[in-house]
Image (cartoon, rainbow, N blue to C red):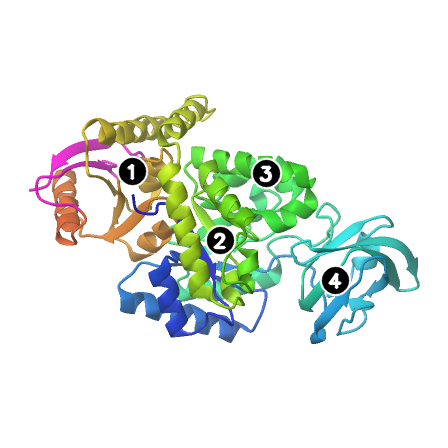
Amino acid sequence: MARRSKIIATIGPASENARTLKGMIEAGMDVARIGLAHGTVDEQIAKFQMVRAVAADLGRHVGIVVDLPGPKVRCMPFTDGGAELVEDTQVSLGVEETKSSSDHINVDYPNLLQDVQLGDSLSFGDGQVVVSIENREGERLKARVVHGGKLNGSPGLHVPSDRLRMSSPTDHDLELLDTFVEMGTDMVAVSFVRSAHDIRRLGVEPAPRGPMVIAKVETKAAVSNLEGIIEASGAVMVARGDLGSEMDIEELPHLQKYIIQECIALGRPAITATQMLESMVSAPTPTRAEASDIANAVFDGTSALMLSGETAIGRDPVNAVRTMARITARADEKFDYESWAEHIQAIRRGSRSDAAYLRVTDALTMAAARTATETDAEAIICLSRSGFTVRSVARFRPTVPLFGMTFDDRTANQLSLSWGTRPLIFNEQATPAATAEEAVATAARVGVVRSGDTVVVVSGSSAETHATDTLRVLRVP
């Protein structure tokens, strides 16, 4: 079985050249992530254009997601190769200077002294370094290092989100968004989402006319408001770094399973992120725990897994992607497809949704996955303008190959995030029946199905109904 779980890889100094990008795509990168928290806009535009050019040269649909910085509190840069914070030593935190050192840390958040309280635990980066606030002296906070480690560059400083006065998206986020919407970005990730209102504040057109919106779940408020956030978003990311700082660490694995399940049941791709192959920033092979973590995320039902520093600053980005692809492909083979489909069917039958088109879509997409199995079909071909039909079928994790057939390049790029889906472009015809036949013929021309194969074709009868309401079983001529 070919790999079904998708791979997102972050583009950074180690991978922002055409040769490495080509190697990453060939190794299994489905979506390129461009983080906008670092570097200049011109540098990020150059990355965007390079990904587009390399993907076009390879004839591949590679989605691009731009990750907005959000209300992230960051340290002023650590100079001279970074600084080591030693456990049980004291450091001070303030806002008045432009550089940081091992005992004198400055941050870019003016309300730090008002929002942080005595006794708070603050973590840096992905939580490896933790300090506890002991007292205040003048315009600086005094903290004890609870867990030491090295800090480089301008790492994030996690302030409890329920006290953070910054809203998401920020004005700077919206300025960056305008730039990359004009560039034609396929997806945009929103940091520190607390409610569906944060998603609506973006003001972008619905996908595929606009970018697919990915909500990053990394706050307590987001967990509390999860259903509304999922419904307002195109996809959801389990951002385990900050979420692990917000919640008790023993709750994180259970939250991961819960968030993924809720996303997939509603037909939204779910992304698992943070420290998937962290050791491969410097090592040639992952730890055993990392391999198990990736496989378990696949077993949880995740649609995609994300690499961050491993490909942005790691020693061998291509090897990191290749390793992720091998582990996920093997986990995909062992995934419990039958139980998962039954589980999702049960959730959807108990859904509170009263929308008639959703009930029709639920019934038909459940039937499509079952029909493909019972007819020994070689593939499911989904015809979709927006990608809705494809994602609706993908919820049930069909065992046969799933092809997302669309007339729109941006939809095809957005489908690069959807589990098990290979996007293909074809030409719409005058009638639904002729369109289905043309889709099958296109799939045959590109070699993904052969003459005599049985295929299940799923589509909506019209754009007005919003429903996936047509299922055909066809034989490839």
Q: In terms of secondary structure, where does tag 4 sit? A: loop
- For the residue pair 33 and 173, the one nearer the viewer reads as 33
Q: Which residue is mark 3?
A: 253
Disc 1 packing (10 Å; few <14; some 14–19; many ≥20): few
Q: Is residue 65 visible?
A: no
Disc 3 packing (10 Å; few <14; some 14–19; many ≥20): some
Q: Decide if residue 428 is on the left or right side of residue 151.
A: left
- State the image coordinates of residue 302 (x, y, percent, origin top left): 46, 42
- Outermost residue on the left side: it is 477
Instruction: Pick whichever of labels 2 and 4 is earlier in the sequence.
Output: 4
Instruction: Pick whichever of labels 1 and 2 is earlier in the sequence.
Output: 2
Q: Decide if residue 340 is on the left or right side of residue 198.
A: left
Which is closer to the viewer, label 2 or label 4?
2
Q: CA distance from mark 3 to mark 2?
A: 16 Å
Q: CA distance from mark 1 to mark 4?
A: 48 Å
Instruction: Pick whichever of labels 3 and 4 is earlier in the sequence.
Output: 4
Q: Which residue is mark 2?
A: 306
Q: Residue at x 35, y 38 (%)?
A: 394
Q: Which residue is mark 1?
A: 464
Q: Is residue 369 visible?
A: yes
- Residue 79, compared with residue 392, is above or below; it is below
Residue 44's mark? none
Q: In terms of secondary structure, where does tag 2 sit? A: strand
